[in-house]
């Protein structure tokens, strides 16, 4: 199935309008800033989060210019966070393209990220909606605190699922959650509707991140990161956390501590990846995705208009089944 076509079908006109507005926000007339923004526009991806904002708005009303400003602001905040993340993580690639910090330098990347963040604030101000401004501001704080928590966990020798889910709830899940809440708010949805939409978005974000983490246990040039890259960055994700917590094999725990200390080499990462697979870590993570997907499916069945159900179901299936 062509999931993306099904997702976009009920919002095709509005999504086209969003793309034009977003591209305009990432455009400058001349100089280094223009060049850097052009570099970023080349790696905008599928823009799943703006589609979610538009779909949620359409489920509760008619997509308006307030919705578009909200979607653009959200995607700009996400884009700025990725630029800054690449600096923090010292990443060379993003979606298979050289990162901004590699193509220019850290100073340029940080300043361009700040420029994009300011453009995000400008767009959200155009909504003239204090609640939407509050949700976006809170998202910015949550994303930053999630990054700090992740850095803090690297120095913590305990390996727990609770710590893992705490981080992804503050990072990936909070972004999807806010896409839904701001989409609903932009068309005047009730508080109860906003809360239900938020939970749906949060579940989508958790599924999205678990699937993303699973990618790191397999070779692929399509996703722009090599096998074991998370471990190189000191991160232990759900598959290996499960494997470690269901085994008393001390040598693997020693390797996990080396991951957190940033002292692990490629051969040791390969050993830990294979251990994770043998111990059933991939299957466990996939089962977690399915459990959370059942909750998301219940929201669609009970709260989504009939003419939008296919798009919402395709969205859910896509983030579960995606290959990159």
Image (spheres, grey):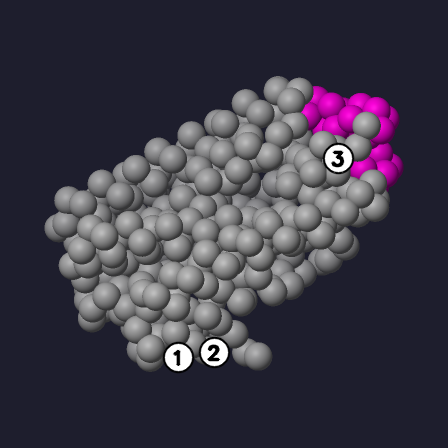
**Other-residue count near label 1 (Cα within 10 Å), few / some / many at <14 / 14–19 / ≥20:** few
What is the chief secondary structure element of the magenta stretch? helix
In the picture, the disc for residue 5 is 2
| Res 246 label | 3
Q: Residue at x 66, y 20 (%)?
A: 157
**SS label for mark 3:** loop
Q: Of the residues tagged 3 and 2, which is closer to the observer?
A: 3
Q: Nearer the viewer, residue 222 or 187?
A: 187
**x 49%, y 64%: residue:** 316
Q: Residue furthest left?
A: 128
Circle 2 SS class: helix
Q: Quadrant of residue 164?
A: top right
Question: On the rendered image, what quadrant is the C terminus found in?
Answer: bottom right
Determine the secondary structure under disc 1: helix
Pick the front one: 93 or 200: 200
Q: Which residue is mark 1?
A: 9
**Label total for image:** 3
Q: Is residue 49 visible?
A: yes
Crowding at dot 2, Cα within 10 Å, few <14 / some 14-19 / many 20+, comes out as few
Q: Which residues are magenta?
A: 249-272
Question: Which of 50 and 101 lies nearest the eye of the viewer?
Answer: 50
**Residue drawn at point x = 54 percent, y = 23 percent:** 152
């Amino acid at each position: 199935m062509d999931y993306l076509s099904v997702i976009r079908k009920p919002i095709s006109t509005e999504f086209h309008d969003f793309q034009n507005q977003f591209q305009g926000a990432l455009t400058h007339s001349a100089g280094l800033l223009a060049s850097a923004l052009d570099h970023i526009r080349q790696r905008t991806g599928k823009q799943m989060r703006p589609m979610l904002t538009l779909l949620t708005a359409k489920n509760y009303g008619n997509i308006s210019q307030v919705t578009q400003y909200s979607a653009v602001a959200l995607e700009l905040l996400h884009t700025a966070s990725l630029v800054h993340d690449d600096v923090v993580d010292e990443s060379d690639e993003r979606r298979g393209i050289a990162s901004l910090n590699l193509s220019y330098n850290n100073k340029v990347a940080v300043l361009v990220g700040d420029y994009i963040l300011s453009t995000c604030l400008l767009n959200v101000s155009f909504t003239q909606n204090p609640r939407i401004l509050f949700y976006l501001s809170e998202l910015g704080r949550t994303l930053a605190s999630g990054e700090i928590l992740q850095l803090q966990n690297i120095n913590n020798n305990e390996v727990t699922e609770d710590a893992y889910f705490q981080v992804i709830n503050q990072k990936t899940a909070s972004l999807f959650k806010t896409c839904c809440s701001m989409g609903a708010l932009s068309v005047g949805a009730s508080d109860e509707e906003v809360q239900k939409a938020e939970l749906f978005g949060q579940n989508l974000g958790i599924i999205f991140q678990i699937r993303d983490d699973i990618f790191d246990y397999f070779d692929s040039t399509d996703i722009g990161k090599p096998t074991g890259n998370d471990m190189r960055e000191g991160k232990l994700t759900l598959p290996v956390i499960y494997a470690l917590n269901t085994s008393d094999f001390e040598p693997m725990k020693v390797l996990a501590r080396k991951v957190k200390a940033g002292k692990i080499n490629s051969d040791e990462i390969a050993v830990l990846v294979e251990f994770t697979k043998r111990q059933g870590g991939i299957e466990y993570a996939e089962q977690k995705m399915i459990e959370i997907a059942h909750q998301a499916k219940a929201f669609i069945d009970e709260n989504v208009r009939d003419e939008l159900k296919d798009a919402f179901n395709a969205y859910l299936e896509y983030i579960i089944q995606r290959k990159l």
